[in-house]
Image (spheres, rainbow, N blue to C red):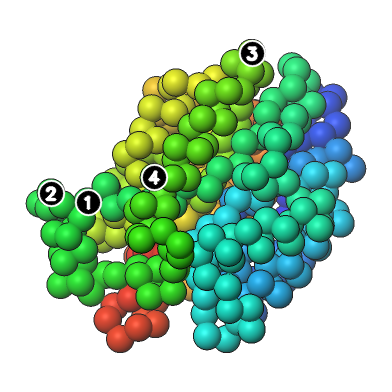
Amino acid sequence: MGRFSVLSDRTDGSRGSLLAVSDLHVGMAENRPLVESLRPDSDEDWLIVAGDVAERIADVEWALRLLADRFSRVVWAPGNHELWTPEHDPVRLRGQERYEHLVELCRSLGVATPEDPYPLWPGPDGPVAVAPVFLLYDYSFRAPGTTTKEESLAYAHRTGVVCTDEFLLHPDPYPSRDAWCRARVARTQERLAAHDPGIPLVIAGHWPLVREPMDVLWYPEFAQWCGTRLTADWHRRFNVAAVVYGHLHIPRTTWYDGVRFEEVSIGYPREWRKRGHPRGLLRRILPYDGPGDDRDGDDRNGDEGDATGQRSVSDGPAR
């Protein structure tokens, strides 16, 4: 398989780029060669990995070690798949303990995490802080016609579109995933508010910060596992140069309130075999060249897993 790159057209004379990718899913055999093909074009290139590397800790370590050995700096934020406790993983940690284990693993590899100081990428126009965030979701992006979490979940169970998180992502010691989400949002918001407003931010997390990216989902009830309304104004409140996310498996560039949002997922083989990789596997976040926007596009991908007996969706259809 050939080398995938987005950097061949650089003409500004600068040497390093801030790149991003998500949803590597290296537990799937066909995705491993794709990840093995990821290489920088410069010794100074940084890479954001915005979650869903794998389910098994050993697979997460394999992928992040590979990337940390190749890129000048790797910055990681967890997705829901890393936080699962699947039966086939000998590491049986759950919830917060699993997350902390992943953080320590990343630190041992020299990979920055949401628990570390924001690393400063030395851009051509001055430093930019890369802020990896771990936020989860609180079911506030509710299913159509519902007004409460309970109604929204019941709607999803009736249609059979249920995220596997409901069975494998344990919130321990928090009473619920939404309680864990609220704690993470409060902690992250405090850190962002304390950040020097004179230094622009690239906020990088697995779940979208705003509701709008879910408008193209084939199954709108899946949006409840895709973020929280609590972050809806962060791209306006803080000095944000760009937002990086994954989870939806709909790679594209969109703009909200003049801020660029980049969905950077690779996704499952059944998805990328259909659409290919027209923009490469790595997305350049900075410096930004301008083309490739999907301001009015509808890049839907209709597909789904079946892991639990219902029409269970491991990350959701249309992503």
Q: Which residue is mark 2?
A: 147
Q: Earlier in the sequence, mark 3 or mark 2?
A: 2
For the residue marked with disc 1, what is the amino acid?
Answer: Arg
Q: Which comes before the other along the chain, label 4 or label 2?
A: 2
Q: Residue furthest right?
A: 43
Residue marked by disc 3: 198
Image vertical order of residue 126 relative to residue 207, above or below:
above
State the residue position of label 1.
142
* Residue 285 horizontal/vertical position (percent): 64, 36
- Which quarter of the image is occupied by the N terminus? bottom right
- Relative to 241, does residue 310 appear above or below in the rendering? below
Task: Point out the tag, 4 or 3, that comes first from the N-terminus.
Answer: 4
Q: Residues within 10 Å of mark 3 (few under 14, many from 20)?
A: few
Q: Residue at x 52, y 85 (%)?
A: 87
Report helix, strand or loop for mark 3. Answer: loop
- Hey, which residue is sitting farthest left in the picture? 145
Kindly indicate whether the residue at mark 1 contacts the one at mark 2 (C-beta within 8 angstroms). Answer: yes
Q: Mark 4 or mark 3: which is in front?
A: 4
- Does residue 187 appear in the picture of this structure? yes
Choose mark 4 or mark 2, whichever is in front.
4
Of pointers 4 and 1, the one earlier in the residue sequence: 1
Q: Is residue 247 left or right of residue 27?
A: left
- Amino acid on which disc 2 is placed: Thr
Query: Which mark sits nearer the N-terminus, 2 or 1?
Result: 1
